[in-house]
Image (cartoon, rainbow, N blue to C red):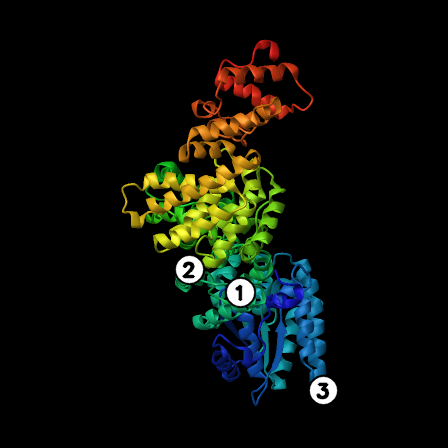
Amino acid sequence: MTAAGSGYGQLVLADAPITKPEQDLLGRDDFARALAEAMVAMPADDGLVVGLCGTWGSGKTSALNLVRYYLGQLDETPRVLVFNPWWFSESDDLLLRFLTQFASAVDRQGVRASQLREALRKYGGVVASAAKLVPGGQLGGELMQQLARALPDDNAAELRERISDLLRKSGERFVVIVDDIDRLCASEVRQVFQLVKAVADFPNTIYLMAFDPEVVVGALDEIHAAGGKGYVDKIVQVEFQLPPPDREQVRMIFTERLNGLLRATVDVDVDEHRWAGFYLDCLDPLLGTVRDVKRYVNALAMTWPLVATEVDLIDFLGVEAIRLRWPQVYRSVLAQKEALVGGVSDSSLSLRRPERDAETHGGVLELLDDEEDRGRCREVLCSLFPRFAYTFDGIRQGTGWEGRWRRERRVCSADHFDVYFRLAVAPDAVSETELRELLTLAADPRALADRFRRLAEERARGRGVSRARIALDRLLDHIPDGLYPRDLARLLTGLYIVADELIELNDRESFVPFGNDTVINWAVQRAVSALEDQPAKLGFLIPLVDSSPSLSAAVLLVGYLEHGAEKQAEMPEAERILDEAGLSALRERALQRIRAAGLCGSLRERPALAHVLAAWARWGNVEEAQRFVSRWVADERGLADFIASSLGYSLGELPAGGTAEPGVRIGVEWARYFPNMAEARARAEALLSALPEWLTPLHCSAIRQFLTATGTGPSEEND
């Protein structure tokens, strides 16, 4: 996020109309000039009412300001009065306010001008008082008779005649511009039309009334038996339709404002092909007026800087469009995450249950009454959520897309969906800023390892794993595409520096029953698969096996590659991750490291010891492993430590909905490291009976599980 002073706050656009021709971006200038000239040329001896019709937000006020500007440029400039009834809405003296403003517009000196001003002010007082005595006066000419009956001593009709006579003799023309009529409630709309029709229909006076016909007619329908449209047609003698805005100009305004917002926040790489399709199919139909653009860009100026580095720009534009245009759909989408995230491939159809998706997705669109709105909203949702697109268009994806969506921070990724609606990254998530920092640290393996150590100390609430595990998952999406080969090798070197600590973490979830070692191996596999030939692949792998501080990670990697080779046995060697010659070379190198660690005793401190011993027995011979174990378990503490080192995790030990608990995995393979299993069991039972001070709860738990796994369990007297 950028600082407030960087300029993005200045991109919030006031919904202010233009006042001068040079500000016109929508091509209304010529129309306004022609309308101004026409109103001055029109005969108005008995008054005239001109309507300027346009939908709400189409720019009527700007057009009125341009008309007013050109009226001031004419040789015979009329007196112009701008009256906005919305300023006086919910006021009892709307008529008085208008007539007082009309009197103020008569600003010339002389007896006749003075008489006109006085007559208008008196007329305003009389009409306003009488109107209070005639609540709900009928629309039309009958109102003046009702007013006259209400105040016979101050006949309003006589005052109006006097005003009309003075206006005819003045030789001046008045133009009254009335705006924002469509913002009024029904009763106030009625008052304005009463004003023009029955109270202030003066000679030499032209009313230019701007309104949305649909809104005004609907308001008058409520109170006029003959229908609102018929009444408007009786009052408005000449009607002009506001020219539609130049669509290219509206698009240009939006593009300029959006680019300004992006320049003020962060650099964004956008897929131009995807952007063109999204804009033309989804966004452009929703931004028909300058007011639409202003409202949309103003919202983006407030929300985009909060998540600019954490979301995909195009997806965010779509989500914000839904929030502003269809808030009920936005709320429904937020509540339907499980039916929206992810994709649909041939292999996932049975899991996704598309018939249930179809019901949910259809229900989202049913929240909209208007068919055109439903179509536009569907277009946006299909562009955001592949499962929505499958429901309505039958579009499926191949494998591997979900990793790409996660890497691109798409809203259809379960890991990123919430950010679009919270406008913030979840407290325990690894943000895009943190991820970029990790990718940058790839150039410095030790700094990367230190950063992962700090992440390993932070637990993600509700997931039961460390933030180091979350960071590994996110890094995986950027391998190999997000890094140059040299930086990729350095990144993996950094992970191998801290691999022992990551392997020892209890980073398993019930729905992801594998540890950090597996994620690291996936990262290596992806990196190697991108290399062109077997020598390059072997050259990449040898330093990890030979020199990495983590012997366990090196052994686990070779075992992982062995398993992959078995699956690829039918493939030509050139197409395998690693051919047999390369795999044999790695086995030998890993075996030499195991033997060296066994001789010096450091093997005892290694995590995943069961895997290391199994590899020693498989790649060397079981007698070597037995001799190492015999030396280790020669004393009672060594026996307890060895048994405790067998604690591990397996899918069967993962409780539903929870994190893994350590469990011992001992069977035939493990038992063969003891030359005399009966003796080992007897010594283990004796330890549980004696409970020496150095025996920890972890020792006790491991010994009990060892006895259970290798026999009938501990004797009852030892429980």
Question: Mark 1 highlights which residue?
Answer: 267
**Earlier-in-chain disc, 1 versus 2:** 1
Q: Secondary structure at mark 2?
A: helix
Res 278 label: 2
C-alpha gap between disc 3 and disc 2 = 63 Å
For the residue carrying disc 1, how many other residues have a C-alpha within 10 Å: few (<14), some (14-19), or many (20+)?
A: few
Q: Is residue 389 above or below residue 227?
A: above
**Earlier-in-chain disc, 1 versus 3:** 3
- Looking at the rendered image, the quarter that the C terminus falls into is top right
Q: Secondary structure at mark 3?
A: loop
User: Of 330 and 387, which appears nearest the observer?
Assistant: 387
**Horizontal and vertical percent for residue 688?**
62, 16
Instruction: Tell which tag, 1 or 2, sits nearer the viewer.
Output: 1
Q: Is residue 286 above or below residue 523?
A: below
C-alpha gap between disc 1 and disc 2 = 20 Å
Q: Is residue 419 above or below residue 616?
A: below
Question: Residue 190's image quarter?
Answer: bottom right
The answer to whether 9 appears left or right of 410 in the picture is: right
Res 583 label: none
Question: Mark 3 highlights which residue?
Answer: 109
User: Of 568 and 656, which appears nearest the observer?
Assistant: 568
**Earlier-in-chain disc, 3 versus 2:** 3
Check disc 2 and give the amino acid type: Phe
